[in-house]
Image (cartoon, grey):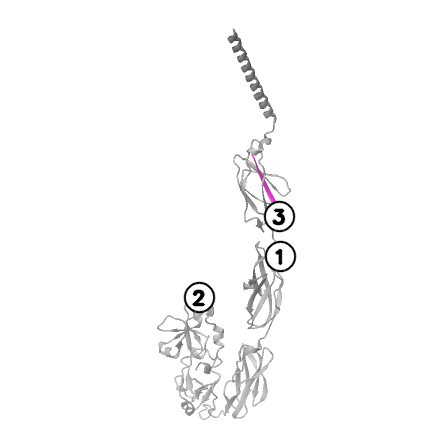
Amino acid sequence: MKSKALFFTHWRMKNLLYQRILNITTAFAMLLALVPQSAFAAYLSSPTNLSMVGGVYTNDTTPTVTWTRSSSATWYQVLVDNGNWLDLGNVDSYTLWSESNGWHTFYIRAQNNSGDISVSAGITFEIDTVGPTVPAVSPSTATEDQSVTFSVTPSGESATMFCDLYVSGSNVGAMTKNGSTFSKAYTFANSGSYSTYARCADGDNNDTTGSSRTISVANNTANDTFIIPSISPSLAYEDKSTTFTIKPYGTLDAIACKLYVSGSNKGSMSRTSSNTFTKSYTFTNDGNYTVYASCENENGGWVNGTSRTVNVVSQEDPDNSTNYFDDAAKGSLIKIACGYYADTADTCKAVYYYGNDGKRHVFPNESVFYTWYNNFDDVVEVSDDFMASLSIGKNVTYRPGSVVVKFDSSASVYAVEADHTLRHYTTLSLLKSDYGSIWTDYLAKVPDTLFGNYTIGSVIDSTNDYDRGTAYYSVDSIDDIL
C-alpha cells in the first residue's frame, strides 16, 4: 500500500512539471508572435567593403560607391548626408547625383523580403573641383636670343604638383619646382610682344590657367648683323640705262635702300623681292665711277655698302675687248672678260672667288656657288693676264648649314660645318630635326673625286650636337672656310 501511494505521488508531481513547461513554451510563442520582425535586424548583415571609385578625395562631382552585397539581402537603401533614404535594387554600386564641393557621408543598409533591416554602413569623402590660384608669370621683359627665366608661385588648398609654361598659346614645356615656386628658362628668337602664362595642377588633378602677361622682348643689338655687299654689275655703257642691284643680308631685314654714284644720292631703290632692291641709272660719259648702296635696317639704322668701281665703256666697243677692270678687290667674284663671239664652253665663262690669300678658288659646280650667292651680278671681269697672275687655291665647298652632303659611293649623310668639315648623322630622326621631313630638298650629291675637299669630323648622335642656324652664321664669307 505504501509503495503504491508513493508511485502515485511521484507521477502526479512529474505531470504537473510537464504541464508547467508546456504552459511557459506556449506563452513564449504567443509573445514572440506579437514582437515585430524589425526588432531582430541584427540577424541581417550590413553591406561591407564600401569603396569610392577614384578614392575618397576626388574632383568627380558624381562619384560612384561600390560594396560587397550582404547575404540574404534583397534590396538596399542609400542616404547622403542628411537627405532621405532611397530604395535601390539588389545591386552592388551606386552613382551619386551632382554633389557640391566639400565633405560628404554616404550611408547604405540592406533589407530582405521579411522586412529585416541591417545596421547602416557609411563612407566619408571630399569633393574638390577648385584648382590652384595661379598669378601671372614674371618677369615682363626679355631680350631676343638671350635666355630668360620665368617663375610663378601658385597657392591653394592643395599643394600644386606641376606647372607648364605657355608662350603665345603654345606649351613650351614643364616648369621646375623649387619649394612652392615653379620656373623655366626660355629664349625668344625675335623681338616683339608675346603673351605668356602658366597652367598648373594640384594633387586633386584640378588645373588652372594662370593670368596672362604680355612680355616685351627687346632687340639684342649685340648680335645684330646687317651687311650691305658691293652693288652689281661692275660694267656699264655710256648713254645706256644700267640696272643696279643690291641684296643686304644678316639678322636684320632691310627697309629701304638708296643708290649713290660718286658720292651723290641718285634716289631710292625699288624693292623687287625679299631684301632685294634695284634702281636704273644712265652714265653720260665713259670712265670709272664709285657706286654703292646705303640701306636702312629694321632698327632704323642706315649702313653704307661696300663701294664698287663701275667701268663705264663706250658703246662703240660692244665686245668690251679692250676695257677691263683689273683692280678687282679681294673677296670678289672674278672672271675673264668674254669676247663678243665667246660660246658657252669658253674658259671666260668660268667664275672664281678671289680670296684674301691672293688666290683664285674654283667653284666645283653651280650647286656650291648658289649656297653662297643668289646670282652672278657681282662678278668682276678681269683681263687674261690678271687672271693668269693668280694661282689656284683650294676649291670652294658648300656653305655650312646650307645643305646636307652624300657621296656617290656611300649611303651616309653629312652636315656641313666651318673649315669644310662633314659630320655624319647617325639617325634619320636627327637629320629630320634639323632639315625637316623633306630633308631631301637639301641633299647635295658629291662625286667621290671631291671627297678630298672635305674633312670628316665627329658624328651627330644627339639633338644638341649640331645647330643648322649656328653653322650657317658661323661664317661671313668664303674666306672663313679656306
Tell which circle, 2 or 3, labels the residue nearer the N-terminal end.
3
Q: Which residues are magenta?
A: 103-111
**Residue at disc 1, secondary structure:** loop
Magenta region's main secondary structure?
Answer: strand
Residue 187 at x, y percent in the picture: 55, 70
Front residue of 132/332: it is: 132
Residue under pointer 3: 103
The residues tagged by marks 2 and 3 sit, at their Cα atoms, a distance apart of 51 Å
Residue 34 placement, left or right of 315: right
| Chain-order first, disc 2 or disc 1 | 1
- For the residue marked with disc 2, what is the amino acid? Ser
**Residue 475 drawn at (x, y percent):** 48, 79
The residue carrying mark 2 is 429
Q: Amino acid at mark 1?
A: Gly
The label shown at residue 156 is 1
In this view, 51 is above or below 406 = above
The residue sitting at 58% across, 21% down in the picture is 24
Which image quadrant for residue 347?
Answer: bottom left
- Cα separation between marks 1 and 3: 17 Å
Horizontal side of 112 relative to 334 (left or right) equals: right
Residue type for callout 3: Trp
SS at mark 3 in the image = strand
Q: Residues within 10 Å of mark 1 (few under 14, many from 20)?
A: few
For the point 40% across and 88% down, the residue is 391
Residue 118, percent across and down? 57, 36
